[in-house]
Amino acid sequence: MNESQLADELVAILSDLIAIPSHYPPGESKAICAYAGDRLKRAGLQVEHHARTPDIDNVVARIGTGSPSLVFNAHVDTVDLGERANWRTDPFTAQIEDGHVVGLGAGNCKGSMAVHLWLAEQLAKRGGPSEGEVVFTFVGDEERLGLDGLYLLRETGVVRPDMLVLGAQTENQLITEERGVLWLTVSTTGKAAHAGNPAAGDNAITRMSRIIQRLETDLAPQLAARTADDKQSTMNLGLIRGGHNANVVPAACTLEIDRRLLPNEDVDCAFAEMKTLIEQIDEPVGTVDVAFVTGTNGFSAPADGRCVSAFSAAIERRLGSPAQFLNATGVSDGRYFANDGIEILNFGPGAGSEGHAANESVPIQQLVDAALIQLDAVNRLTKMNGD
């Protein structure tokens, strides 16, 4: 197959995927997973479907057996299309514009999904690995940061990777480190009263303002001093709710906080740090509550690790220059494996700026390069039959 034929095949697969709605909300993934499962069964892979809730399906396809286990992952759900008027074309019909495929999810993450489907079929045609296994996972519930996708596959032991490669918009470079994430809520209570006599009440918003000031004056400077390899430990006070009318002293207020942690920070310790600081503020007993919502540690794959080395060599061979190592702004489903002692990396076609945007697109050349780089990397990581 020459590169022109490869480009046509990848565009055809991606076009099929774009035409199958899988946006969140609602995040339904049964139809697109059925498409993936059917293709992989026809190719000869061992295919399983795993679901905990009726509408969120996940596909696991294997070729080979034993160790090492090299797992590829792409999430099948996308964000919603947003304002339809902002799209030049039908978001669910792939269009070719200036060497790009345009459509909802073209980059995040259906571009990588298309490449992974092609790669799985190629490995099957070549007989698969004679040692170890290659596993392809296509999962839902990623855009919701939910637990019914890749988390479920890890929780139930369906996949136990030694190396995990997540499809991502890295323009075919590498993300091998990712910050952890912690979400928590702070709730304050007070006593309602008429706004004409505020002294008769106890203002929960005012109480929250004192907590916010302490976070900004005491914790924020400490976080600003925590850096590692151009990564920053951060805190975002993202959402606040309180009161129900301007003429009533508010009796309740809730603050939602997002903390991003360096790979060497621990999510439980980060929560304890914030909880302790807040509880040390001089507020009446029972008027402040700090609650853990969700959180996972970050990860960092060694630069000389087996998987990173294979991908680095394949990138340089294909693109003619050394692999670049990028910083991740967000978090991936790789965070669920952060404590498992495995190699985790993000790789794929498309630019991060294209994700979650109207007229999302992915360069066709990057699809081709991603396919050939990953095929080369698999050949380096596994002993393929016939090699």
Image: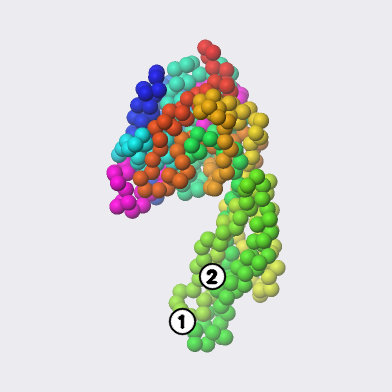
- How packed mark 2 is, by other alpha carbons closer than 10 Å (few <14, some 14-19, many 20 or more), is many
Q: Label 2 is placed on what type of residue?
A: Cys
* Magenta highlight range: 63-92
**Where does the image place residue 363, in percent across and percent down from the top left?**
40, 35
Q: The C terminus appears in which quarter of the rendering?
A: top right
Query: In the image, which disc is placed on residue 373?
Result: none
x, y percentage for residue 118?
A: 42, 26
Residue that badge 2 annotates: 253
User: Residue 50: in sight, yes or no?
Assistant: no
Q: Dot 1 surroundings within 10 Å: few (below 14), some, or many (20 or more)?
A: few
Secondary structure found at label 2: strand
Q: Position of residue 344 (x, y in %)?
A: 59, 36
Residue bearing mark 1: 247
Disc tally is: 2
Q: Residue at x 35, y 40 (%)?
A: 102
The residue positioned farthest toward the bottom in the image shown: 197
User: Which of the pair 288/297 is nearer the observer?
Assistant: 297
Q: Who is closer to the viewer here, 56 or 378?
A: 378
